[in-house]
Image (spheres, rainbow, N blue to C red):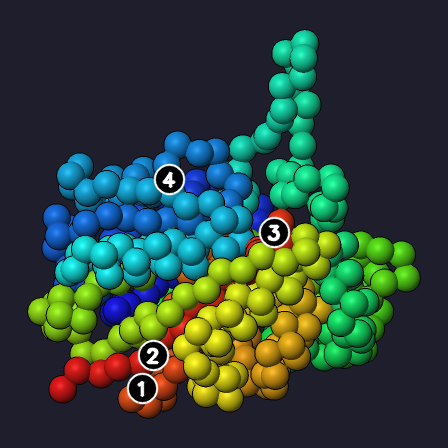
């Protein structure tokens, strides 16, 4: 059961958080979770963290020590690229199920600003730098993310007009949520000196009040000549972290939790790497079928908006009205902090469930993943008398 969730502000890469490395982004979130859920640090069984483009070295362990957890608390880092944060929560939920009443901190982090340069070593020992890892063998095709989003737009007949309208709606919803103070309780402010002097970073910086349909229509195709995927209907890279406290129902009661999200089921699936953006739909179909549910049974839905084309294609395939998803905006407005984004989805779902509590309401988090995969998690809101 997830009884607490927090995240940092999501800020554009090479912006206000560029002075913080991944473990420095995550450590304040872990401290805030322990304090907010009244969890003794020594009671944590493990710290499970997703990360996509870091330098290795087990950022989960590093962040746990940075957060002040005792040396007896271990950590493990998960890499399923964009799905890493959500898969870390999946792994922690399975550890709870396997081991009874353990308390876990799980989530994800990404500091794109400080990610290390990467290189292959040539036969002569000289480095050959590359921008991204290989996600599929050449025989399967290994398109860049934007090209794959264009492939999905074409294959699934998602028009430019729909993509732009969805992106604009994401910004409008995020702006309204921020203005209403919806994000305030879930955000852990960070101290950063990126501008040359210490400053407290408390807000997301992605939502654009000046964005209009007319402005979006002026954006040229960004990845394929004559295409429909543009910088305006694609997410931007962001730095950030998000994590949750997850434990058994019995242990949650003993900690004094009043409510939370039960993990009811999880699903992961693979798809054609050329259409990698549809992975979330395949995972959700598998999960819902296993649970005997349909999309109409789900009350709250959070989908990682890497691109409007893939988001709409997946929602269409699942029979979900896009108006029902991402009630407070998504990554098109807030940004995509790769390894953290899946954990951000769960953080948002817990906040939404608590904002309008309905006992037993079902919630779905889903994300598509590089290489042609997707992960989905089914959750249920529960209160304690």
How much space separates mark 4 and mark 1, taking CA atoms? 35 Å
Task: Say whether residue 77 is visible.
Answer: yes
- Determine contact: label 3, label 4, CB under 8 Å: no
Quick one: label 4 or label 2, which is nearer the N terminus?
A: 4
- Residue on which disc 2 sits: 380
Secondary structure under tag 3 reads loop
In the picture as drawn, the residue positioned furthest to the right comes out as 226
Quick one: SS at disc 4?
helix
Residue plotted at (15% across, 60% down): 101
Residue located beneath label 1 in the image: 360
Residue 189 pos. (x, y %): 37, 59
Image point 67% across, 17% down: which residue? 122
Left or right: 320 in relation to 178? right
Badge 2 or badge 3: first in the primary sequence: 3
SS of the residue under disc 2: strand
Q: Position of residue 88 (x, y in %)?
A: 38, 54
Residue 176 versus residue 152 in the image, above or below: below
Q: Nearer the viewer, mark 4 or mark 2?
A: 2
Considering only order in the chain, which callout, 3 or 1, is on the residue closer to the N terminus? Answer: 1
* Residues at discs 2 and 3 in contact (Cβ within 8 Å): no
Q: Quadrant of the N terminus?
A: bottom left
Say what secondary structure mark 1 lies in: loop
Q: Is residue 354 above or below residue 144?
A: below
Residue on which disc 4 sits: 59
Q: Identify residue for label 3.
A: 370
Q: Front-most of 374 and 45?
A: 374
Label 1 and label 2: CA atoms lie apart by: 6 Å
Badge 1 vs badge 2, beta-carbon distance below 8 Å: yes
Do callouts 4 and 1 mark residues in contact (Cβ within 8 Å)?
no
The disc at residue 350 is none
Question: Which residue is rendered at x = 80% and y = 57% of the image?
Answer: 222
């Amino acid at each position: 059961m997830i009884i607490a969730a927090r995240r940092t502000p999501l800020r554009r890469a090479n912006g206000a958080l560029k002075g913080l490395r991944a473990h420095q982004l995550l450590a304040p979130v872990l401290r805030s979770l322990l304090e907010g859920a009244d969890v003794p640090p020594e009671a944590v069984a493990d710290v499970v963290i997703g990360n996509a483009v870091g330098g290795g070295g087990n950022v989960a362990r590093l962040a746990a020590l940075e957060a002040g957890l005792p040396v007896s608390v271990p950590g493990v880092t998960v890499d399923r690229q964009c799905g890493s944060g959500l898969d870390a929560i999946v792994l922690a939920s399975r550890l709870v199920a396997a081991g009874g009443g353990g308390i876990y901190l799980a989530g994800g982090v990404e500091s794109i600003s400080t990610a290390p340069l990467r290189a292959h070593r040539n036969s002569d020992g000289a480095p050959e730098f590359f921008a991204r890892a290989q996600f599929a063998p050449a025989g399967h095709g290994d398109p860049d993310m934007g090209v794959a989003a264009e492939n999905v737009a074409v294959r699934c007949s998602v028009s430019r007009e729909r993509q732009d309208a969805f992106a604009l709606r994401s910004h409008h919803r995020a702006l309204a949520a921020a203005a209403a103070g919806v994000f305030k309780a879930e955000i852990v402010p960070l101290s950063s000196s990126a501008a040359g002097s210490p400053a407290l970073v408390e807000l997301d910086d992605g939502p654009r009040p000046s964005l209009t349909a007319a402005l979006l229509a002026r954006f040229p195709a960004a990845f394929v000549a004559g295409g429909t995927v543009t910088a305006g209907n694609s997410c931007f890279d962001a730095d950030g972290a998000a994590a949750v406290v997850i434990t058994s129902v019995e242990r949650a009661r003993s900690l004094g939790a009043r409510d939370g999200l039960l993990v009811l089921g999880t699903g992961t699936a693979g798809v054609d790497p050329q259409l990698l953006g549809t992975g979330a739909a395949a995972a959700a179909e598998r999960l819902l079928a296993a649970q005997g549910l349909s999309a109409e049974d789900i009350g709250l839905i959070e989908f990682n908006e890497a691109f409007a084309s893939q988001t709409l294609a997946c929602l269409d395939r699942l029979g979900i009205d896009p108006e029902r998803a991402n009630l407070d905006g998504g990554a098109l407005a807030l940004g995509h902090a790769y390894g953290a984004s899946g954990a951000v989805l769960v953080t948002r779902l817990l906040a939404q469930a608590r904002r309008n509590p309905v006992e037993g309401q079902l919630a779905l988090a889903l994300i598509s993943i590089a290489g042609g995969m997707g992960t989905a998690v089914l959750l249920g809101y529960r209160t304690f008398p």
